């Protein structure tokens, strides 16, 4: 565990304050070294994410700061859903349904 610099969304990206992250079999395989998608450590695991939009990159119009969102961004590249903040391409996340909490949305 280490402190990382706060990520900044680029054009077309959204910064998400993570409320929940799911653990899927790929996370375990990558962590165990069986599926080297992300190269050599250190890296931040996690793809399944649910949270709140913290900031928008240039050109993002589908979301606003404060929106609750979920998705599986950047699969098979580093998404960093196990961090406090994660950057996601705007076209790889969606508005979280109001009837589902963050834990279930990230599952």
Image (cartoon, rainbow, N blue to C red):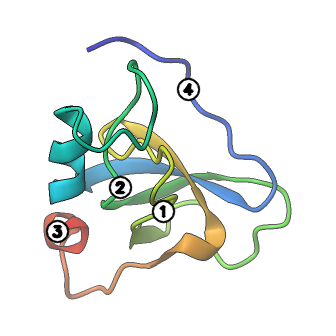
Tell me, yes or no, whether the two marked residues, 3 and 1, touch with CB atoms within 8 Å: no
Residue at mark 2 to residue at mark 4: CA–CA distance: 18 Å
Tell me, yes or no, whether the two marked residues, 2 and 3, touch with CB atoms within 8 Å: no
Which residue is denoted by mark 2 in the rendering?
47
Residue at the far front: name it. 34
Which residue is denoted by mark 3 in the rendering?
107
In front here: 21 or 63?
A: 21
Tell me, yes or no, whether the two marked residues, 1 and 4, touch with CB atoms within 8 Å: no
Q: Nearer the viewer, mark 2 or mark 4?
A: 2
Which residue is denoted by mark 1 in the rendering?
73
Q: Nearer the viewer, mark 1 or mark 4?
A: 1
Q: In the rendered structure, which disc, 1 or 2, sits on the residue that comes first in sequence?
A: 2
**Residue 102 rendering spot, x and y as whole percentages:** 22, 66
Residue at mark 3 to residue at mark 4: CA–CA distance: 25 Å
- When asked about the image quadrant of residue 98, the answer is bottom left
Which residue is denoted by mark 4 in the rendering?
6
Residue at mark 3 to residue at mark 1: CA–CA distance: 14 Å
- Quarter that holds the N terminus: top left
Q: In the rendered structure, which disc, 2 or 4, sits on the residue that comes first in sequence?
A: 4
**Residue in view at x 38 percent, y 20 percent:** 41
* Dot 2: element: loop
């Amino acid at each position: 565990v280490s402190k990382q610099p706060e990520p900044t969304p680029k054009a077309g990206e959204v910064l998400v304050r993570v409320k929940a992250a799911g653990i899927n079999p790929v996370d375990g395989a990558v962590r165990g070294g069986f599926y080297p998608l992300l190269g050599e450590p250190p890296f931040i695991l996690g793809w399944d994410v649910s949270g709140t939009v913290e900031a928008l990159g240039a050109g993002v119009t589908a979301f606003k700061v404060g929106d609750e969102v979920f998705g599986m961004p950047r699969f098979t590249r580093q998404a960093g859903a196990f961090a406090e903040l994660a950057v996601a391409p705007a076209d790889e996340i969606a508005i979280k349904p109001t009837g589902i909490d963050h834990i279930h949305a990230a599952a």
